[in-house]
Image (tube, helix red, strand yellow):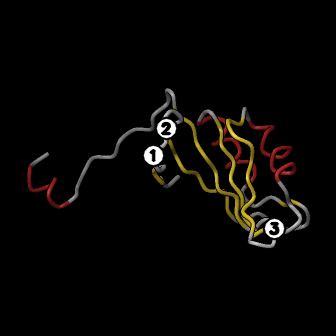
Amino acid sequence: MQETDQLKGNFPLQPRLRQDSGQGLMVSTLDHIVGEKALYDTFGQFGPLINAPKVARDETNMSKGYGFISYGDFESSDAAIASMHGQYMMNKQISGVHGRYFAASTTSAPRTTLL
């Protein structure tokens, strides 16, 4: 790569990290009655979760309609994305299951990557 390419921001794509990595998913358009247990029961079938699922809530503890799942490996998160995108949970279709890759051993902000 030439120096001018680096200055323009033309960097080669990096391969996915497979060792000591995991993937977090954001699940959007959830029914307001979907809670953490429902996310755990539904998404836990695809592989081990490294954190308890989390539903985003407002100041009155009502669901904002999206939640987060954290897997310990890419295979589990990829299976969840392939199986759950467009499926129904509690009478509402899930329109988005989006991946965010992160290094499990760091506390820095995750890198968002398109799938």
Q: Residue furthest front?
A: 59
Query: Is residue 30 toward the left or the right of residue 25 in the image?
Result: right
Q: Secondary structure at mark 1?
A: loop
Residue at left 9%, top 48%? 2
Label 1 Cα crowd, 10 Å radius (few <14 / some 14-19 / many 20+): few
79 or 7: nearer the viewer: 7
Report how far apart the C-alphas of labels 3 and 1 lie in the structure. 27 Å
Residue at left 25%, top 50%? 11
Residue that mark 1 sits on: 108
Residue at left 22%, top 55%? 10
Query: Is residue 9 toward the left or the right of residue 59 in the image?
Result: left
Q: Which mark is residue 60?
A: none
Quick one: label 3 or label 1, which is nearer the N terminus?
Answer: 3
Q: Are marks 2 and 1 in contact (CB under 8 Å)?
A: yes
Q: Secondary structure at mark 3?
A: loop
Quick one: label 2 or label 1, which is nearer the N terminus?
Answer: 2
Q: Residue furthest top?
A: 19
Task: Count the marks.
Answer: 3
Of circles 3 and 2, the one toward us is 3
Report how far apart the C-alphas of labels 2 and 1 lie in the structure. 8 Å
The x, y position of residue 18, in whole percent, is 49, 30
Label 3 Cα crowd, 10 Å radius (few <14 / some 14-19 / many 20+): few
Quick one: label 3 or label 2, which is nearer the N terminus?
Answer: 3
Q: Which residue type does callout 2 highlight?
A: Ala
Q: Secondary structure at mark 2?
A: strand
Of circles 2 and 1, the one toward us is 1
Q: Which mark is residue 103?
A: 2
The x, y position of residue 35, in whole percent, is 85, 57
Label 2 Cα crowd, 10 Å radius (few <14 / some 14-19 / many 20+): some
Residue that mark 3 sits on: 61
Quadrant assignment, res 86: bottom right
